[in-house]
Image (cartoon, rainbow, N blue to C red):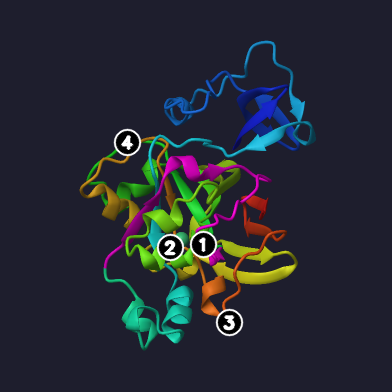
Amino acid sequence: MRIVTFTHAGRRQVGRLDAGAVTPLAVDAREGAQTLIDLLAAGNHMPAAGAPPLRLADVQLDAPLPRPRRNVFCIGLNYRSHAAELAARGFNGAKTAEDLLPKAVVAFSKVPESVIGPGAAIEMPAASSAIDYEAELAVIIGKAGKRIARAQAMDHVFGYTIVNDVTARDLQKRHQQWLIGKSCDTFCPMGPWIVTRDELDAGRLGVKLWVNDDLRQDGTTADLVFDIPAIIEALSATMTLLPGDVIATGTPAGVGMATDPPRWLRSGDRVRVEIEGIGTLENPVV
Ligand code: MG
């Protein structure tokens, strides 16, 4: 099943997407609503009373979770190909990819207010001159849990979407901790919808990103250092995961900082992320 959050006639709603038609559901889509994923995960997919299906082309898609209930969890250095390209540039003093491969999950976060939907503009802050992109598969948690064992981890997944982990590299470096460089307003494009877990084998999905027509990232989730069960096990070891939590699982090789000279985003660019089995997330840069 594909779940969309959309705006039509000035009203934000949640719907089910089938073959280009959006059926509004009887769940509350108000911004900040904490119950959305609880309701959906509990099987509450009742169509809204008296609401006819709409054409996808006639609605404006929003981020599937326009304002996550808390910070978006993000995993760093989680593709072997990405670690290799950063090692080649001497990132963190590394000489080989092996030096950069984390021994334990590297986690940071983006504030909920950084989330924007498909088509919304990534706004370049005046404080940065090094804006980068990161195509990522994102996991949506559907069932709360703590100390979740690897074997049960997938039971806690509601579905998947796409996140572009937009990053101000200069701020990321200057402030040491990554929160500021990762959490600028508009730096978390998300969408275009949630694909439920039953429809996707997330272990081997193509992850691609274009800047305008230039293919920059072309990876596969088979290259993950820590797979989804390992990430859930690590995060939930000490923190209770909650329905509606979003976990961006890291980015493959091809980021702008990995080339010499770096290829930063510029005003007027369009960034398009495509993940196999999910769809396409495109955002302009201004
Ligand atoms: Mg990232």
Identify residue for label 1: 128
Which kind of residue does numbered mark 4 sit on? Ala
Q: Are marks 1 and 2 in contact (CB under 8 Å)?
A: yes
Q: Secondary structure at mark 1?
A: loop
Name the disc covering residue 178, or none: none
Q: Secondary structure at mark 2?
A: helix
Which kind of residue does numbered mark 1 sit on? Ser
Q: Secondary structure at mark 3?
A: loop
State the residue lying farthest toward the bottom: 95
Relative placement, left or right, of 110 versus 215 is: left
Q: Earlier in the sequence, mark 2 or mark 3?
A: 2
Relative placement, left or right, of 235 versus 252 is: left
Name the disc covering residue 261, or none: 3
Identify residue for label 4: 144
Q: Nearer the viewer, residue 136 or 121?
A: 121
Looking at the rendered image, the quarter that the C terminus falls into is bottom right
Between label 1 and label 4, give the one nearer the viewer: 1
Between label 2 and label 3, give the one nearer the viewer: 2
Residues at marks 1 and 2, CA–CA distance in whole angstroms: 7 Å
Q: Residue at x 58, y 55 (%)?
A: 124
Q: Earlier in the sequence, mark 1 or mark 2?
A: 1
Between label 2 and label 4, give the one nearer the viewer: 2
Identify residue for label 2: 171
Q: Quadrant of residue 117?
A: top right
Image height of 160 relative to 181, above or below: above
Residues at marks 1 and 4, CA–CA distance in whole angstroms: 37 Å
